[in-house]
Amino acid sequence: MTNLISTQRGAILVISLIVLSVVTLISVTELSKAGEQSRMTSNFQQQNITFNAAESAMSYSMKKISEQASSDEENMVAMGNSMNADEGVETAVDNTHLSNDSMKVSVSYRSNTVNALRAGISLDSSQNDFMIRKVTFTATSTVINESSGARTTIVQGFTYE
């Protein structure tokens, strides 16, 4: 009987160490996964915040343009500046009512002039080239969250007549 006890003393220790190692390995793996999930959730939340701010800025700008706000309104000024600038040059407006200490919100405009005169139509001497021009704009709403590094850009095209 003493012989049986002496041969099994170390086996229990080895088995318990193996079980403890496996449990520790599983615990470390699960903690690592939980940290990753937390970072992914935080990144998704920051991206969602910047997306909503970009959508709001674009919606606000389109509302001001569709209302044909006063000519000194910042979006109308930026559109006019983009029409006077060289082709493809963007003019930006900072959206101060959505910006805060950690998030910068802006909308930029780029214009493109297209000949809108249909075939078979001619101009007389009293008409100018503004009658045959069609100006299309590309509005780009950009939000940068400086604290997290999240960035969202939304682009929308429209024609202003």
Image (cartoon, rainbow, N blue to C red):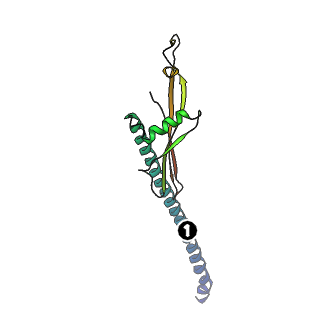
User: Residue 131 appears at what percent x and percent y?
Assistant: 48, 20
Amino acid identity at mark 1? Val
Q: Residue furthest left?
A: 67
Asked whether the viewer can see residue 110, the reply is no
User: Residue 126 appears at what percent x and percent y?
Assistant: 48, 15
42 with respect to 70 (left or right): right
Image point (58%, 86%), residue name? 5
Q: Nearer the viewer, residue 51 or 6?
A: 51
Image point (60%, 82%), residue name? 8
User: Residue 121 appears at what percent x and percent y?
Assistant: 50, 11
Vertical order, 18 against 105 (above or below): below
Image point (53%, 40%), residue name? 91
Asked whether the viewer can see residue 35, the reply is yes
Vertical order, 87 against 57 (above or below): above
SS of the residue under disc 1: helix
88 with respect to 104 (left or right): right
Residue carrying label 1: 28
